[in-house]
Image (cartoon, rainbow, N blue to C red):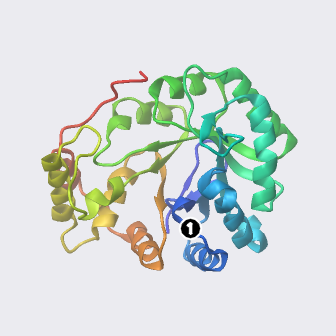
Amino acid sequence: MQYRHLGKSGLTISEISFGCMSLGSDHETNTRLLHHAHDHGINYFDTADIYQNGFNEETVGRAFKTRRAQVIIATKVGNQVRADGGGLDWNASGKYIHEAVEKSLKRLQTDYIDLYQLHGGTIQDPIDETIEAFESLQRQGKIRHYGISSIRPNVIREYIKRSNLVSVMMQYSLLDRRPEEECLTLLHQNNIGVLARGSVAKGLLLGKSAEPYLNYNTAEVSNAAEAIAWVSGSKRTATATTLKYILQHPALTSAVVGIRTHEQLDDNLQASAAPSLTPAELEHLRNAVPINRYDLHR
C-alpha cells in the first residue's frame, strides 16, 4: 500500500481507503472485513452519521475500539433526520454541528474524530458560522481536522478563502471529469487534499451493462468501459486502471472506495501495487469520451 499526506493536516493516509457506506448490517461480519482491510494497509475509514441511520458509525466504532490509535476515522455532518423520521433536512448551523458531533463521538466510541466533514453544502449556507463550529470543535480537541464533501465549485472556493479546511471529498472518475476543469488545480495549489468517491462510476467502468450516466449516453459509457478494458489488458485489473486514472492526478490523496465483500476488498488492495498508467495510456483514456464540465454551482 502507498501512503500520501492529506493536505496540510499532518495525517498520512492510504491511497486506497475504505468507504464504509457499503457495509452490511452485521457487526461481526463488518469487523472481520474492516480488520482485513487494516491488516493489509488501509488506514483511512470514511463513514457518516446518516449511513444506516447511525449504525454505520456504530459498527466502525466497535471494529476499531481496540485499534483506535492505529486508524484514521472520518465522518460527516449536515443531514438532519426529521423528527418524524420521514426524511432529511439540510442543516449546516453551528448549533446543529455541535449537537451532532457528540452523537457521532458516542457511536464511534472515541474521544476524537480525525476528520470531520460537512456532508454537502450550498452557497446559501451560513458558511462563517459553519466554519466557526468546526474551529471550535478543533480547539476543544473533539476533532483533529475538518473538510467538506462537495462537488460545487462556488462552495469549494468559499471554503478555501475563508477556512482552514484540509480536504475536499468529491466525485471523480473517467466518467466524471468535472473536477479537472478547475477544482483539482485550485485545491492542489492550496495544499488541500482531495478524496475521490465514485471512481468506478457505479461499476459502469468495470463491465456492468452500460446505461446513461450524468451527461453521457449509453454508447459513450460503453466507450469508456472499453477503453478501461483495453488499457488494462493483462497488466492490471479494470479496477486498478480506474483507480490509477484518478490517483495519478497530482491533487489526489486517496480513492475512497465502497467495499462490501472480501473479494471487492482484495481487488482494490491490488490496485495500489499495479503499474502506473503510461502517458499514452492516460491519453487513450482521456480520448475515450468527451470531457464533461459543471453547468451549475459555478
Q: Secondary structure at mark 1?
A: loop
Nearest to the observer: residue 293 or residue 39: 293
Query: Residue 88: x, y in percent?
Result: 60, 40
Q: Residue furthest right?
A: 140
Name above or below for residue 181 compared with residue 142. Answer: above
Q: Is residue 275 above or below residue 290?
A: below
Q: Residue 6, position in %: x, y? A: 58, 48
Q: Quadrant of the C terminus?
A: top left
Where does the image place residue 68, in percent across and percent down from the top left?
A: 75, 66
128 versus 224 height, above or below: above
Query: Does residue 253 lie above or below 140 as drawn?
Result: below
Neighbourhood count class around disc 1 (C-alpha, 10 Å): few under 14, some 14–19, many 20 upward: many
| Residue 72 makes an appearance in the image | no
Q: Is 110 on the left-hand or right-hand side of 16? A: right
**Which residue lies at the image location 75% right of the left edge and 37% below the top edge?**
97
**Horizontal and vertical percent position of residue 252:** 45, 47
| Residue at horizontal 24 percent and vertical 57 percent from the top | 278
User: What residue is drawn where x is 60% and y is 70%?
Assistant: 25
Q: Nearer the viewer, residue 176 or 3?
A: 176
Answer with the quarter of the image where residue 180 lies: top left
Q: Is residue 286 visible?
A: yes
* Residue with the mark numbered 1: 42
| Residue type at the position of mark 1 | Ile
- Quarter of the rendering containing residue 20: bottom right
* Side of 182 where 70 appears, left or right: right
Residue nearer the viewer, 18 or 90? 90
Task: Tell me how many marks there are.
Answer: 1
